[in-house]
Image (spheres, helix red, strand yellow):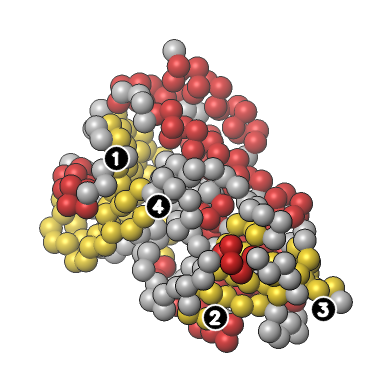
């Protein structure tokens, strides 16, 4: 793929990092990179947790490190209060995502244009290579989520609770000694007042919430309609725009970051022409594609199961596979080893 200009649509994690690294890689490429962003204010703070090893990747690529708010080493996966499973010694960090995005935007402020544009319209110019980094604002199957920062009593554990009726997920991520990031989203619960009511009730089943400090609504795409990293000959999708999101936890920062790094590494400048190697990009994100696809399929299966059947699956899951799942390092061999047993139980 070749073009005279690189257009990046979206300046969240994926878009800002792709712009930062691509500009560095292309060297003197003045005027060849433009980033379009609809809003000057970053508005999607709900996901703030990443496996701690991601920080090493950030540092290795010369990217500004985010502020760490809290470290978590215990993860509790709960199924509607019927059963739970605890994974220990897998470190995640809670980051100040909003301030990080703002800092990354400052580092590329000379190439950002704050204007809403259509990906298709900028791609109509065949001289453009387009990185679609719009996050959740792509495709259908929007799932509304409610999120709040709250004063709470917590046990230093990240908690994910699957609900059955309605099917969905609530989360509790400590981000300070007495502050938590809490929230939830549920299939077919689209009325915002009802969404808040269900989420608050479910969260209060697992922790003591004292005061809501702030509240927000946002959208995610779980499961993604499809996982597609290319759209038309000159559009490359990054992160959640490509469907690279972990449906059973809503984790998106890791996929956004790693796909942006991969996209930058697949880009080069030859004789004043920007070149993009599609094979390099796909190879570098192959595990993200695999993990996203697997979680999409599991999501679509377990939403029809009873709590008891989901508990059977959770109990049967291999400890090492679960650990690698939480670490974000699940690869092909782990999937081949662990998934057939889970599929057998789900349909038995």
Foreground disc of the pair 4, 1? 1
Between 232 and 25, the one lying in front of the other is 232
Q: Are marks 3 and 4 in contact (CB under 8 Å)?
A: no
Task: Pick the quarter of the image with the N terminus.
Answer: bottom right
Which circle's residue, 3 or 1, is located before the other in the chain? 1
Say which residue label 3 marks.
272
Q: Which residue is mark 4?
A: 220
Callout 1: SS = loop
Q: Which residue is tagged 2?
A: 112
Q: Is residue 215 placed above or below 35 in the rendered structure? A: above
The answer to the question of whether label 1 and label 2 lie on touching residues, with beta carbons closer than 8 A, is no
The secondary element bearing badge 3 is classed as: loop
> What's the distance in space between the residues labelled 3 and 4, CA to CA?
38 Å
Residue 258 can be seen, yes or no: no
**Numbered disc total:** 4
Residue 143: image x %, image y %?
35, 48
Which residue, given by chain and number where applicable, does mark 1 sit on?
A: 188
Q: Is residue 268 or residue 170 the one in the foreground?
A: 268
* Mark earlier in primary sequence (4, 1): 1
Of the image marks 2 and 3, the number of the one nearer the N terminus: 2
Q: Are marks 2 and 3 in contact (CB under 8 Å)?
A: no
Q: What residue is shown at x 53% (from left), y 49% (from top)?
A: 243
Residue furthest toward the right? 271
Can you say whether 279 is above or below 81 in the image? below
- Measure how far apart labels 1 and 2 are at the Cα level: 36 Å
Determine which quarter of the picture holds residue 126.
bottom right
For the residue carrying disc 3, how many other residues have a C-alpha within 10 Å: few (<14), some (14-19), or many (20+)?
Answer: some
- Closer to the chain start, of discs 3 and 4, is 4
């Amino acid at each position: 793929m070749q073009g005279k200009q690189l257009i990046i649509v979206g300046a969240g994690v994926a878009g800002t990092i792709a712009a930062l690294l691509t500009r560095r890689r292309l060297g003197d490429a003045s005027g060849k990179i433009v980033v379009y962003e609809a809003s000057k204010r970053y508005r999607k703070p709900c996901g703030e947790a990443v496996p701690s090893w991601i920080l090493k990747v950030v540092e290795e690529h010369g990217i500004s490190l985010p502020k760490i708010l809290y470290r978590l080493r215990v993860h509790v996966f709960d199924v509607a209060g019927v059963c739970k499973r605890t994974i220990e010694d897998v470190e995640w960090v809670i980051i100040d995502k909003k301030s990080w995005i703002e800092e990354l935007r400052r580092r590329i402020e000379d190439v950002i244009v704050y204007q809403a544009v259509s990906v298709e319209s900028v791609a109509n110019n065949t001289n453009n290579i387009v990185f679609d980094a719009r996050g959740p604002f792509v495709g259908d199957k929007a799932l509304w989520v409610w999120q709040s920062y709250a004063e709470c009593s917590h046990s230093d554990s990240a908690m994910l609770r699957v609900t059955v009726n309605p099917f969905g997920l609530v989360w509790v991520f400590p981000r300070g000694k007495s502050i938590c990031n809490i929230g939830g989203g549920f299939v077919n619960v689209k009325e915002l007042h009802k969404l808040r009511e269900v989420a608050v009730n479910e969260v209060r089943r697992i922790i003591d919430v004292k005061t809501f400090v702030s509240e927000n609504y946002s959208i995610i795409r779980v499961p993604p309609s499809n996982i597609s990293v290319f759209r038309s000959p000159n559009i490359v999708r990054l992160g959640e725009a490509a469907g690279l999101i972990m449906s059973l936890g809503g984790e998106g920062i890791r996929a956004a970051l790693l796909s942006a790094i991969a996209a930058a590494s697949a880009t080069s400048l030859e004789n004043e022409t920007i070149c993009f190697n599609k094979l390099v990009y796909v190879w570098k994100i192959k595990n993200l594609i695999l993990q996203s696809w697997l979680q999409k399929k599991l999501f679509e299966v377990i939403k029809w199961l009873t709590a008891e059947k989901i508990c059977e699956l959770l109990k049967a899951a291999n400890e090492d596979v679960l650990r690698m799942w939480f670490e974000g390092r699940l690869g092909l061999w782990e999937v081949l080893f662990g998934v057939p047993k889970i599929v057998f139980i789900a349909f038995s």
